[in-house]
Image: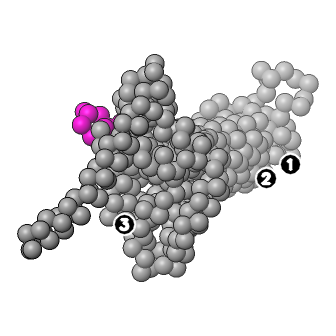
């Protein structure tokens, strides 16, 4: 009696397993046929990738899930998997199955591999990663609705939306917004097992590239001290400058085509200077170190300066007869206060205020020209220095 009963129990257990195995074999045979018919001009793995893309575009989540399993089973035997981790993460996000957000260890592994490895599988040139990301962007609302139909918790819903946004968007400003939302998510659901995943994989810090350059245009105003103050009461004019960056070191070259406003004529250096607008060219080559606080940066600078003054040329006499000091060399010290307006694709825009003092050997021309220029520059700079994820 007992041997017969045991045999019946064993048979009842084996029949469903055999049926499941048979179903798996039938699924594999059907998928194999579908893959070969999808793109006969491509190798088998490449045709499988195109079939996956088509099923996702058609909204066939069940068919795409079966195909993902087939590709994982048979692609694992190849030297290069049929899908990169980033491509698989995109595909599973488009399917919007709750498995993606409820199996935390599996999701952790998938996110870690996707964030570190290549986005496009290196064995294929079909741009599948970009196509999947475009599909995610175009259907983000419908994808979120598919997840809602499966009854996620509030924490799962918010995490999934953060994941969709992190995968679909790119650029500095978009990532900044995602970072703020991740912080809010962690603060609202600190006990959720998804909170550390969001903080580790969905939040991305950014830093400037090591090398960069900028061009600035602005306007300078200033006053003199020393003997120059008795000759010129005001200084003003347009400023152009260029900057090079290496990490936090800044090298800046500047030229200002300024006017020194002389209220009355005077004698200096054996020449007679007319009152009025004297041409006052100022140049500087400085180096400094940038201290950045988010979008705000302070850069103290110091370096060489050059100044040249030529008399008022409003007279009818030719420029060659005007009194001039020729170029005199000295020093320049100052600091730049800049506020960055970043763009997702550079160049970025900086609003600048620079203040400092420039003093040269103009006193060698005449003791009455000794002294320095206190200046304030206002302007904007186009900064070509990409932000990179860290």
Q: Which mark is residue 263?
A: 1
Answer left or right for 83 relative to 144: left
Callout 1 touching callout 3 (CB < 8 Å) = no
Under tag 2, what secondary structure?
loop
Foreground mark, 3 or 2? Answer: 3
Answer left or right for 295 relative to 374: left
Q: Visible in this render: residue 183? A: no
Q: Which mark is residue 104?
A: 3
Above or below 378: residue 38: above
Local crowd size for mark 1, using a 10 Å CA cut-off: few (<14), some (14–19), many (≥20) = some
The quadrant holding residue 67 is top left
Sequence order check: which comes first, mark 1 or mark 3?
3
The residue segment tinted magenta is: 75-82
Local crowd size for mark 2, using a 10 Å CA cut-off: few (<14), some (14–19), many (≥20) = some
Q: Which residue lies at the image location 38% right of the left edge and 23% below the top edge?
A: 43
Above or below 376: residue 237: above
Residue that label 2 marks = 233
Residue 301: percent from left, percent from top: 51, 51
Residue 92: percent from left, percent from top: 46, 52
Local crowd size for mark 3, using a 10 Å CA cut-off: few (<14), some (14–19), many (≥20) = some
Callout 1 touching callout 2 (CB < 8 Å) = yes
Answer left or right for 109 relative to 348: left
Callout 3 touching callout 2 (CB < 8 Å) = no
- Measure how far apart labels 1 and 3 are at the Cα level: 78 Å
Foreground mark, 1 or 3? Answer: 3
Q: Main secondary structure of the magenta part?
A: loop
Sequence order check: which comes first, mark 1 or mark 2?
2
Q: Residue furthest right?
A: 316
Quarter containing the N terminus = bottom left
């Amino acid at each position: 009696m007992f041997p017969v009963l045991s045999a019946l129990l064993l048979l009842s257990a084996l029949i469903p397993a055999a049926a499941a195995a048979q179903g798996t074999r039938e699924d594999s045979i059907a998928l194999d046929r579908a893959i070969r018919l999808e793109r006969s001009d491509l190798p088998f793995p490449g045709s499988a990738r195109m079939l996956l893309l088509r099923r996702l575009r058609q909204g066939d989540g069940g068919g795409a899930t079966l195909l993902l399993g087939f590709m994982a089973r048979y692609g694992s035997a190849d030297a290069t998997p049929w899908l990169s981790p980033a491509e698989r993460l995109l595909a599973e996000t488009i399917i919007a199955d709750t498995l993606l957000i409820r199996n935390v260890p599996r999701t952790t592994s998938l996110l870690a591999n996707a964030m570190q490895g290549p986005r496009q599988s290196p064995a294929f040139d079909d741009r599948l990663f970009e196509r999947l990301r475009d599909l995610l962007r175009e259907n983000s609302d419908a994808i979120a609705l598919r997840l809602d139909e499966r009854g996620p918790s509030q924490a799962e819903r918010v995490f999934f939306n953060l994941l969709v946004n992190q995968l679909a968007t790119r650029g500095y400003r978009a990532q900044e917004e995602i970072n703020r939302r991740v912080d809010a998510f962690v603060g609202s659901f600190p006990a959720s097992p998804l909170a550390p995943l969001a903080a580790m994989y969905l939040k991305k810090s950014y830093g400037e590239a090591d090398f960069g350059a900028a061009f600035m245009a602005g306007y300078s105003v200033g006053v003199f001290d020393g003997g120059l103050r008795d000759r010129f009461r005001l200084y003003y004019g347009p400023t152009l400058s260029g900057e090079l960056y290496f990490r936090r070191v800044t090298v800046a070259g500047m030229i200002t085509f300024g006017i020194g406003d002389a209220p009355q004529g005077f004698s200096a250096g054996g020449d007679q200077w007319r009152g009025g607008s004297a041409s006052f060219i100022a140049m500087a080559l400085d180096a400094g170190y940038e201290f950045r606080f988010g979008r705000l940066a302070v850069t103290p600078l110091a370096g060489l300066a050059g100044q040249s003054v030529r008399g008022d040329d409003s007279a009818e006499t030719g420029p060659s007869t005007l009194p001039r000091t020729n170029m005199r060399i000295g020093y320049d010290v100052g600091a730049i206060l800049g506020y960055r307006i970043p763009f997702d694709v550079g160049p970025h825009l900086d609003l600048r205020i620079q203040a400092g003092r420039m003093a040269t050997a103009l006193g060698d021309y005449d003791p009455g020209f000794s002294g320095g220029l206190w200046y304030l520059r206002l302007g904007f700079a186009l900064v070509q220095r990409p932000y990179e994820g860290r």
